[in-house]
Image (tube, rainbow, N blue to C red):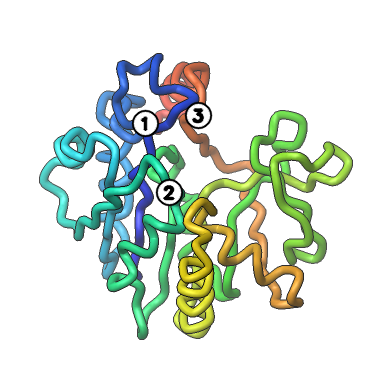
Amino acid sequence: MKIIIMAAGRGTRISRHIQGRPKCTIDIDGRPLIARTFKILSEFPGTDIAIVTGYNEQAVIEAIGRHTYTKFLNPFFDVTNSIASLWFAREFIPADDDLIVMNGDLFFEKKVMETLYAEARSPVMLADSSRIKEADYRFKWSGDVLQKYGKDLSNDETTGEYVGLAKISRTSIPAFRQRMHELIDAQAHGKWWEDILYSWVPEGHSVFVKDVKGLFWGEVDYIEDIERLRAEAKHRGL
């Protein structure tokens, strides 16, 4: 399994509260968030990890520590979005293996990753149907197939919140890679990497959703997220 971790962004919504540090270097459970992620991923045999850095790259490298990985740099992190970061890591996208792409500021219990590893459908994105009113990036799905997506969906339109993890199997990789290049060639470097998958929805290409309701996860977007994650991690013994 190949895994690409997105960790290039500045994190403008929270940056001033954390002294400009990259979000993935924040201490949640006695260690940097990104080090915790690497520790969990290292427990899955055959995992090959790459990380895309940009803003304050050295802080991210120091936080990772001695784990083994391949590093790619998005030098234009201030004027591009994560699709550009993925493009800079394009040589890591496999031709003969499955790929997981994830956000670097994600905290999750190991069962979340186990659920994604076990998924045979492709592409598949993780979401949580227990989060609707407080959802940030919202999904509407029916029969496990994504129908609508975005921050502006109403509560009635929302089935759950996107987790920040997706898996693309080797059978879907050629189309995934081609669409990435098409969007970059169209100068759509301000899009999220997930827009590659979202662009398939209106074309009738099924993008599957796996509900991880009941499993614990969270992203570091706001200062309140840090304290909530610390409290939950301690309470759950994660």
Above or below for 115 versus 207: above
Q: Residues within 10 Å of mark 2 (few under 14, many from 20)?
A: some
Residue that appears at 64% across and 50% down? 127
Circles 1 and 3, Cβ within 8 Å, touching? The answer is no
Residue pointed to by mark 3: 221
Between circles 3 and 2, the one closer to the viewer is 2
Above or below for 68 versus 206: above
Three-letter code, disc 1: Lys
In front of the other: 104 or 37: 104
Residue that appears at 35% across and 70% down? 1
Give the mark nearer the N terminus: 3 vs 2.
2
Residue 136 lies, in percent from the top left, at 65, 36
Above or below for 136 versus 157: above
Residue 61 lies, in percent from the top left, at 17, 41
Residue pointed to by mark 1: 23
Residue pointed to by mark 2: 80
Circles 2 and 1, Cβ within 8 Å, touching? The answer is no
Above or below for 122 versus 145: below
Residue that appears at 53% across and 60% down? 188
